[in-house]
Amino acid sequence: MENQEKKHKRRVRYSGAYPKSYKEKYKELNPEKYADTVSRVIQKGSTPAGMHISICVNEILEFLQIKPGQTGLDATLGYGGHTLEMLKCLDSRGHLYALDVDPIESAKTKERLEKLGFGEEILSVRLQNFADIDRVSAEAGLFDFVLADLGVSSMQIDNPDRGFSYKTDGPLDLRMNPEKGISAAERLTEITQEELQGMLLENADEPYAAEIAREVVSRRRRGKPIAATGDLRRAVEDALSQLPAPERKEAVKKSCQRTFQALRIDVNNEFEALYSFMEKLPGVLAPNGRAAVLTFHSGEDRIVKKFFKQDYKEGLYREISRDVIRPSQEECSRNSRARSTKMRWAIRSEG
């Protein structure tokens, strides 16, 4: 019957007092509807599923000194937390451009910010890699301020379908844009042992790079390809099985983190994109324009530090941060994902 009433589909019940899997956390995934639940999760020092808590917001705003009427660039939109605060500083005057390569999350963020009153007249969201800032500047002109937050967003890490975390089972994808390139699982079907060892060393300073590379390739040769996050986690566990029991658990945890990091950097060409961004950055900044970059591991920080120092010596910047700025102890206690953050900044010369 056409007017037959649709059956109500009950939500799958979860075991225990609190939901454990990503999809069961329906309240956290609807922050507008369940604000109290989200607030309690944040107060406990956790990040709600499907959300991202921005890091170093006060430090960033204090340095950028955003004024109404200026033109700025958020090179890594993500969940839009930094973007929102920068838009507030513009006070409906000026314009902010925001870039992201993730078509899934950037669409959600754009919609969320539009509902808060920040439409096309003040905010332009581009599905674009931050390596292309020169193309954006060709359209927008020079920027008074630029922010690049190089961290992976929490909603990407927490969603098992994206394959960013070793803690949950899912396809080993790791791509920021799942519509382009090859997944981490595909990458592991073609990489040699020597290449994988080099990747783990270069992208993550992994001390057990040789053992992990040997185990991954050995599994592939035995007809056990690494297709899921759990496969890679077990490969790391087996590679470190020779370690004494008391230290093995922590070593496996850290090696899993570094291995997933190294693969993510590789499949997304993150270092190449960062090199391109840093190389082009002085050319898109207005005289006395300000740029801040947040990094989350030593490889990124080395690149940013090198470029800032080199460009300062060449006179492209009139001032750069001499030391890294870190989140406060209070912020780290509220958000454990802030602990590895380093912020560096530079101010464009006048000429």
Image: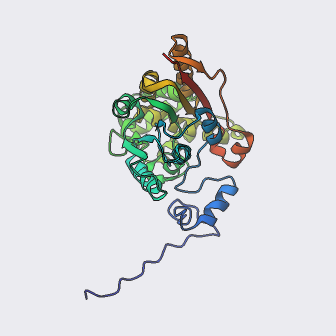
Q: Relative to residue 139, is residue 48 depicted above or below?
A: below
Q: Residue at x 52, y 66 (%)?
A: 26
Residue 344: x and y, percent? 60, 27
Taking the image as shown, residue 282 lies to the left or right of residue 294, namely left
What residue is rendered at 59% in x and 49% in y?
A: 53
Which residue lies at the image location 50% right of the left edge and 62% below the top edge?
Answer: 23
Camera-side residue: 52 or 113? 113
Q: Is residue 332 left or right of residue 4?
A: right
Q: Quadrant of residue 238?
A: top right
* Residue 347 higher or lower than 240, as above or below: above
Q: How many marks?
A: 0
Spot the residue most to the right: 329
Quarter occupied by the N terminus: bottom left
Q: Is residue 177 left or right of residue 78?
A: left
Residue 142 picture location, percent across and down: 42, 29
To which quarter of the image does residue 131 belong?
A: top left
Q: Position of residue 304 (x, y in %)?
A: 54, 24
320 and 256: which is toward the camera: 320
Name the residue furthest top: 314
Question: Residue 223: in sight, yes or no?
Answer: no
What x and y, as percent, mark residue 63? 62, 32
Scheme of image coloration? rainbow
Using residue 307 as the reference point, say whether residue 224 is left or right of it. left
Can see residue 259?
Answer: yes
